[in-house]
Amino acid sequence: MPLRLAELQDRLRASMLGFAVGDALGFPLRGLPPPGLMRLTHIADDFAARPRGRFARGQFSDDTQLMLAMAEAVTREQRIDGRAIASHLSWLWQEGVILQPPTSATDAAQALLAGTPWMGAGAELGVRDPSCLSRALVLGFWSEASPPRLAHDAQVSTVVTHKDPLCTAASAAFARAVQLGLSGETLDANTFCAEVSRAAAPALQELADELYYLPRALAWEPERALPALRRVGVSASEFDLDAGLPPHVTPVLLTALYCVLKAPRDFRAAMTMVLSSGGEVDVTAGIVGAILGAHLGTEGLPARLRRNVLYGDSLVEAADRLFDAKLAKEQVAVSQTVTVRR
């Protein structure tokens, strides 16, 4: 049975809030090694008492900023438009408000501001950091579920900053995971992973295969599974087990999905697993929060975290604008269909 509009709107709000909450939980911990983090039993109960640099508690990172910029671009254009996405992303650098972004995103933004077309500004093949992933949350709500369409829209979204097809495949997979949460359907791990695998396949079969077989890792306890997932797709020269999650889309996505599937109805438990992984935990925790938010709705997010994430009202407003834009677009499409039939 299709969700009522009010319930779908709540799930979208929760997905965007959940992303920001996970990002804000991980932001002060980004780059820290796992051993010390694994001893923090209440790591997901509240935002860290020690802020990151000059930033306040509950502050999210550049990943949520990029997600919000993507949402605004799609809301205004009522479609996935590369030129609009590039304009909204580069504005964050132009105004100097972007928070500690990776070099790849900064280089792309500077190229855009210098006049490079949006199709050519992104980092070259082989650059696979996960800063491209946050925008896929918006795709999960806006785009169609068919793998070719989703892969196309994911490429438009990611090529602005990353040209590698792995980034497109991972973004399509994350978007499909959000769609499955928003649908309200209860799916077992095998079906869920088969669906996200199908979404990744048009862009890169190699990642699709890793996603398809991810349920095998669910038989392992986190202490064994998470270190193993950190290695997947990462060359020996890039990998440091003691440093936690590497800045690479494959282990980030696989780790996030493992944590979601291991604790599908327990936001804190899933967050504790991912935050204890160390390394690139902000965007990874954001992905976990987005999928669980879409699946559980607003009431599934811990109230303290909902209240204390910075700019929570603005996140809800951005979700509502995106929701209203899609609803308006669908109403126009229905009206045009009726007119043609007459």
Image (tube, rainbow, N blue to C red):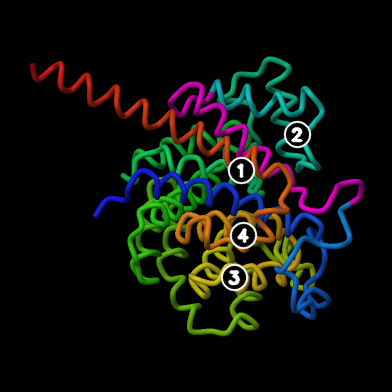
- Identify the secondary structure beneath mark 2: helix
Q: In terms of image quadrants, where is residue 251?
A: bottom right
Q: Tell me which numbered mark, 2 or 4, is placed earlier along the sequence.
A: 2
Residue under label 2: 106
Q: Are marks 3 and 4 in contact (CB under 8 Å)?
A: no
Q: Nearer the viewer, residue 259 or 279?
A: 259
Q: Tell me which numbered mark, 4 or 1, is placed earlier along the sequence.
A: 1
Q: Tell me which numbered mark, 3 or 4, is placed earlier along the sequence.
A: 4
Looking at the picture, how far across and down is residue 123, in whole percent? 66, 36
Q: Please report the bounds of the magenta region as a residue range.
A: 53-82
Residue under label 3: 270
Residue under label 4: 252
Q: Tell me which numbered mark, 3 or 2, is placed earlier along the sequence.
A: 2
- Identify the secondary structure beneath mark 4: helix
Q: Amino acid at mark 1?
A: Cys
Which residue is at a point 42% across and 63% down the rendered structure image? 209
